């Protein structure tokens, strides 16, 4: 029996980027950068992922502007000085048969760089009382918005020069572009707020700036948060429309995730206790509905652990790619295991201790395997 005869292992493509299978390593912060530069530990991490069989690797959050930095152990693409290290990283992945996209990122009000008078975090609108966010920040100005737009475009230009096969714009979770999309955090009265189209303006302006700087042939992807994790925030009815509008604007693939985070892991993108089939694929319904409305590839992320379920999702045309994060922390070679016919369920127990460890300044790794 030819165990490779699965729809998951069929070669496919996004725009003109050829991929060896339908498995994507979803962007995963690793805490391994040294003064925002690529390190040998990251070289080893990404080489291992490529050797493990992933088709497309998306890097961890890589900031495009100094005011968008969230961690001192985070990679940057904000200046040309970072290109040589990133070029070494892309070469290591390509040498092992995988493709790699860089996730372009701005933290917005979540920024956590060393504070100074010229580095105050910024968000779409300043909220006096916000039970979901306590840190200080200011309302982003029109000039600062355009500065951010240009920074994303410049980051994409550097990405192409560094050999990345694509870029992915981070527009999910708690960060700047989710803050603009959510009516909870975006209460502006100008052309950047109010209607859904206005709240999506920054996404579209970023796309157009990138296109001008990288050309029409370069794949530009987006990770979009389509519902917030608390009442009063972005609702799926608008999030689905946002995904449709972004696909129509020209983005070459959508990865569907959550918007702003609520309280507790159940109201975030990293849910715990994924211990049976019913808990897996927790964004499946969102993906299915969006897939029906767009003409570009859709990536499904969110608690996927079982090979047969992943296969079913692709066969049913609920998504085009399977995107995984935490399982590859514990088993970076699991894709090759599955290709060889060992279709065991991913060993990740979704404890989130890897994430808690990163918050304490440690580097990425499965805490269960360290015990």
Image: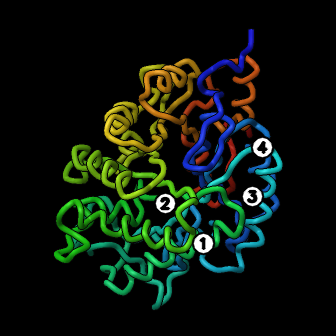
Distance between mark 4 and mark 1 Cα atoms: 23 Å
Residue farthest along the bottom direction in this orientation: 117
Name the residue that disc number 2 marks.
169
Q: Residue at x 50, y 88 (%)?
A: 116
- Can see residue 218? yes
| On-image quarter of the C terminus | top right
Residue 128 percent across, percent down from the top left:
22, 73
Q: Residue at x 67, y 71 (%)?
A: 36
Q: Specify few, some or many for label 3: CA neighbours under 10 Å numbering under 14, 14-19, or 20 or more.
A: many
Residue 338 percent across, percent down from the top left:
69, 23
Name the residue that disc number 1 marks.
157
SS of the residue under disc 2: strand
Dot placed on the residue nearer the N-terminal end, 1 or 3? 3
Dot placed on the residue nearer the N-terminal end, 2 or 4? 4
Of residues 334 and 153, the one drawn nearer to the viewer in this rendering: 153
Distance between mark 2 and mark 3 Cα atoms: 18 Å
SS of the residue under disc 4: loop
- Rendered image quadrant of residue 155: bottom right
Dot placed on the residue nearer the N-terminal end, 2 or 3? 3
Dot placed on the residue nearer the N-terminal end, 4 or 1? 4
Residue 278 percent across, percent down from the top left:
42, 21
Distance between mark 1 and mark 2 Cα atoms: 13 Å
Distance between mark 1 and mark 3 Cα atoms: 15 Å
Name the residue that disc number 3 marks.
90
Up the image or down, 143 lies above or below 337; here it is below
């Amino acid at each position: 029996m030819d165990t490779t005869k699965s729809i998951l292992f069929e070669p496919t493509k996004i725009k003109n980027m050829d991929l060896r299978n339908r498995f994507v390593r979803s962007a995963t912060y690793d805490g391994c950068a040294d003064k925002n530069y690529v390190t040998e530990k990251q070289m080893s991490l990404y080489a291992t992922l490529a050797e493990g069989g992933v088709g497309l690797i998306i890097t961890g959050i890589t900031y495009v502007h100094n005011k968008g930095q969230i961690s001192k152990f985070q990679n940057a693409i904000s200046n040309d000085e970072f290109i040589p290290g990133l070029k070494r990283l892309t070469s290591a992945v390509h040498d092992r048969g995988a493709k790699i996209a860089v996730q372009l990122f701005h933290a917005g009000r979540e920024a956590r760089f060393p504070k100074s008078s010229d580095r105050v975090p910024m968000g779409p609108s300043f909220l006096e009382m916000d039970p979901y966010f306590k840190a200080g920040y200011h309302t982003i100005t029109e000039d600062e918005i355009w500065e951010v737009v240009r920074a994303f475009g410049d980051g994409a230009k550097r990405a192409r020069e560094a050999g990345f096969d694509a870029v992915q714009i981070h527009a999910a979770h708690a960060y700047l572009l989710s803050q603009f999309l959510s009516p909870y955090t975006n209460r502006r009265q100008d052309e950047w707020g109010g209607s859904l189209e206005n709240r999506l303006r920054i996404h579209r302006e970023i796309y157009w700036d990138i296109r001008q700087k990288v050309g029409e042939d370069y794949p530009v992807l987006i990770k979009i948060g389509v519902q917030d994790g608390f009442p009063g925030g972005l609702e799926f009815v608008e999030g689905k429309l946002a995904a449709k509008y972004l696909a129509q604007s020209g983005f070459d693939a959508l990865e569907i995730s959550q918007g702003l985070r609520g309280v507790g892991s159940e109201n975030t993108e990293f849910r715990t206790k994924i211990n049976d089939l019913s808990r897996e694929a927790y964004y499946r319904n969102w993906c299915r509905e969006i897939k029906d409305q767009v003409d570009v590839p859709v990536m499904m992320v969110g608690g996927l652990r079982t090979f047969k379920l992943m296969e079913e999702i692709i066969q049913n045309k609920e998504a085009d790619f399977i995107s995984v994060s935490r399982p590859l922390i514990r088993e970076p070679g699991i894709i090759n295991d599955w290709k060889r016919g060992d279709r065991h369920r991913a060993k990740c127990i979704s404890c989130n201790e890897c994430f808690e460890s990163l918050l304490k300044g440690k580097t990425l790794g499965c805490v269960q395997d360290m015990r």
